[in-house]
Image (tube, grey):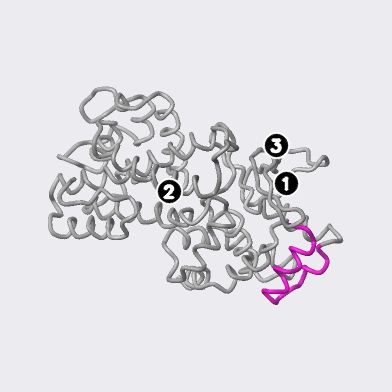
Amino acid sequence: MDGGFQLNALDPRSLSDLQRLSREQPDSPETLRAAAKQFEALFLQMALKAMRQATPQNGLFDNEHTRTYQSLLDQQLALQLAHSRNNGMSDVLFRQLGGLNGKSGGSAIDALETGGSASGGTGLDGLDLAVAAQTAKAAASLERQGLLPATETAGDDPVGALIAQLQAARGSARAAVGGTSAVAASAAVEEGGGTAPSGKEAFVREIWPHAQAVSRETGIPARFIVAHAALETGWGEKILHHADGRSSYNLFNIKAGSAWQGETVSRTVKEYAGGTSYSEQARFRSYGSYTEAFRDYARLLSDSPRYAGVLGQTDAAGFARGLQQAGYATDPRYAAKLAGVIGGSTLKSALAA
């Protein structure tokens, strides 16, 4: 433990304890190091998740329940590794945020990629090469999203800055605990109610202008479009990625048919037929940006005759039902799940933020 901080990945009080420490001991190096360790745990969790996704998913005992508990185990394992092994990443963050008056010689990504650490040794000595590679990708991903703390923005309260970044990055992570699919994760969040964590608010803010543009073109309310993206991607947490870590930006999980000429990304998906579910490998479209993804989504709805009943639909249940009847998804509960996200408190609070 660090400064009384509890090593429980699922304890909702964990960040509250960290905030308490920052108030009680604002100038303590131990407090800053505890915050850096938490951020390191987040990186390790993303690395473990990426490696899990790269392994076969159709084993004899592999199902939603085992994947759920595996996810819980990985979260706790990442936290334990961050606090029990000298992986080097927390040293980089500690130094970057001014720990012991340290000076940052560049971004945390630069230090990680070159193996630098606060002690001058190899920053990722304690990790296997596979974990190190995935961790670097995870770090780069968070830096692109603005979730990696920067020295120039830490100001006089580095712990507070890091806690804010942790809250943003971890905001929607627990959505995946209730199920492994994006649809299941979103449905679980909506059933839980409550206010939207900051991660979901950030997701809504980022895609809202794009949703408004599609709304003007299709007549579909922008909040319906945001809800659709949230359902398909677990509030942005489960966007499909390429093997090299690049995002597909496919917010609506649109599949790549024979007419698609762009890049694709593959994954195993669950489909339904005749009341039973089965798994299959499917190819999905990949875009260069969210702008491209939303334009393609608008074209799909506008140009395909089967979605004629969806255009201009301003009733949440009607919109959700229209998508399902048009064959957008095979899940028999898809319409109910989408309508639940549209009318749920999570979306309402995110839009009001």
Of tags 2 and 3, the one toward the viewer is 3
Q: Give the residue displayed 47% in from the left and 49% down from the top.
A: 68
The residues bearing labels 2 and 3 have C-alpha atoms spaced at a distance of 26 Å
Considering only vertical position in the picture, is 160 above or below 286? Answer: below
Quarter in which the C terminus is drawn: bottom left
Query: Label 2 belongs to which residue?
Result: 146
As helix, strand or loop, the secondary structure at mark 1 comes to: loop
Label 1 crowding class (10 Å Cα cut-off): few <14, some 14-19, many 20+?
some
* Amino acid beneath label 2: Gly
Considering only vertical position in the picture, is 305 above or below 321? Answer: above
Which mark, by number, is residue 255?
1
* Amino acid beneath label 3: Glu
Tell me, yes or no, whether the two marked residues, 3 and 1, touch with CB atoms within 8 Å: no
In the displayed structure image, the side of residue 339 where residue 70 appears, left or right: left
* Mark sitting earlier along the chain (2/3): 2
Query: Label 3 belongs to which residue?
Result: 263
Considering only vertical position in the picture, is 69 above or below 118? Answer: below
Q: Which residues are magenta?
A: 307-328
Q: Give the residue displayed 43% in from the left and 70% down from the top.
A: 195
Q: Position of residue 266 (x, y in %)?
A: 66, 38
Which mark, by number, is residue 210?
none
Label 2 crowding class (10 Å Cα cut-off): few <14, some 14-19, many 20+?
few
Q: Determine if the magenta segment contains residue 313.
A: yes
Frontmost residue, 72 versus 51: 72
